[in-house]
Image (spheres, rainbow, N blue to C red):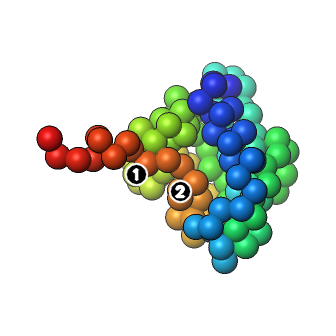
Amino acid sequence: MSDASERFFDELSRRGREPTLVGVTGEVRFDIVDGKRTRHWLVTIDGGDIAVSRRKGRADCTMRAEVELFDRLASGEDNAMAATLRGALICSGEVDLLLAVQKLFPGPDRAERTPG
């Protein structure tokens, strides 16, 4: 697993409560593929409270991505919805959770969005 992916989940586990997810409840499992190995992260959201584990348990929504794509999502270089629409991020289960969870990923730097 890459450093960017590890940092993303470590930071997410330290947040504890995410104000943008108040009212959201569910479990999202991220299956991150790195060659022949797949690593699993389970993110539990309970009214905005976030818990992260390395379990491969049942989830309401599952997202599967190659590690390179996940690194881009974790660093704000790519967008989860756009990746899903082009088939690079495979989402199954409650798609509403994808819409909520994409708020956890950073966006592009403000400088990149400002016209030059």
**Which residue does the image show at 14% across and 41% down from the upper left?**
116
Residue 67 image-quadrant placement: top right
Outermost top residue: 35
Q: Can the viewer see residue 9 in this picture? A: yes
Name the side, left or right, on which 70 lies relative to 28.
Answer: left
Q: Position of residue 34 (x, y in %)?
A: 64, 25
| Apparent side of residue 113 relative to residue 57 in the rendered image (left or right) | left
What label sits on residue 82 in the rendered view? Answer: 1
Q: Nearer the viewer, residue 107 or 72?
A: 107
Tell me: 79 left or right of 4. Answer: left
Picture residue at 50% right of the left edge, 47% below the top: 106
Residue 56 figure quarter: top right
Measured as percent of width and height from the top left, residue 33 is found at 64, 32
Q: Mark 2: which secondary structure?
A: helix
Farthest left residue in view: 116
Q: Earlier in the sequence, mark 1 or mark 2?
A: 1
Which of these two is toward me, 68 or 11? Answer: 11
Mark number, residue 43: none
According to the picture, the residue beneath numbered tag 2 turns out to be 102
Q: Is residue 110 above or below residue 27?
A: above
Q: Residue at x 54, y 40 (%)?
A: 74
Q: Count all numbered tags in the image, as a single digit.
A: 2
Neighbour tally class for label 2: few under 14, some 14-19, many 20 plus, Cα within 10 Å: some
User: Can you tell which of label 1 and label 2 is closer to the viewer?
Assistant: 2
Q: Which amino acid does label 1 sit on?
A: Ala
Seen in the picture, residue 53 relative to 47 is either above or below; the reply is above
The answer to whether residue 45 is visible is no
